[in-house]
Amino acid sequence: MIWFMSVALAGTAAPCSDSAQMAQDNARLRELFNEDAEDRASRSPNVYKNDIKRAKELVGMQEAGRICTALDQYLAAATLQHSQEPDQIKVAYDMALAAMNGHAENSAWLVAQIFDRYKVARGLAQWYGTQFSIRDGKKCIFEVDPTATDDERKLHGIASITETYTTFLAESGKAGYEPTTEILVRYNLQCESKAWR
């Protein structure tokens, strides 16, 4: 099923050749992106309910071939990544890749962010080290695959894993501690990895 969704994104549909339709969709994608950001900034109690509505609309637009430009792909991916459905997060990842291939600004960072979110949603170790959560009122970081390299992180505009761990430890009251996975585990700062569905 995931392969099918990836292939569907690659095709072009008639709405992408209609400039009036593209302008309308661009405006709607910007609205959805802004609504998503506002929900998160205001800590809206309806954020998850709104995420479901936005995801449904975005998937419908994607299936209808109405997410056309690199900027469209970026805005849609940045919004859809907040879905709680791993298959929809995978669609967001494919959109982010299309945005990156189209040279949309900040899209390489978004690809890394969504790739990690997808891995976490599947109960797997993340790659770049971008995913955190709150557990028992405390921030935790999800396990990071030890085979991932800082060179790959740099290509996507992500800090080295040492920088990420150092910052996180300082935020957690552990400034000066060695920035290693072992320290995170010892002080119960690593989130449990468990598939969402």
Image (cartoon, rainbow, N blue to C red):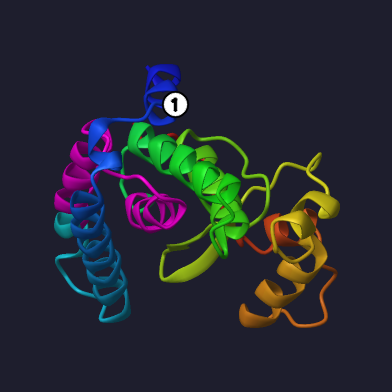
Question: Which residue type does callout 1 highlight?
Answer: Ser
Judge the density around disc 1: few (<14), some (14-19), many (≥20) Cα neighbours within 10 Å: some
Q: In this view, does 73 lie above or below 59?
A: below
Where residue 35 appears, as percent x and y from the top left, is 22, 70
Q: In this view, does 118 lie above or below 20?
A: above
| Residue 192 visible somewhere in the drawing | no
Give the quadrant of the N terminus: top left
Where residue 188 appears, as percent x and y from the top left, is 61, 60
Q: Which residue is drawn at 85% across and 53% down?
A: 151
Q: Nearer the viewer, residue 193 or 50?
A: 50
Q: Which residue is drawn at 78% across and 43% down?
A: 148
Q: How many marks?
A: 1
Q: Which of 62 and 17 is in front in this view?
A: 17
In the image, is 193 to the left or to the right of 160? Answer: left
| Residue 101 visible somewhere in the drawing | yes
The residue to which callout 1 is attached is: 6
In the image, is 34 to the left or to the right of 96? Answer: left
In the image, is 71 to the left or to the right of 155? Answer: left
The span shown in magenta is: 51-80
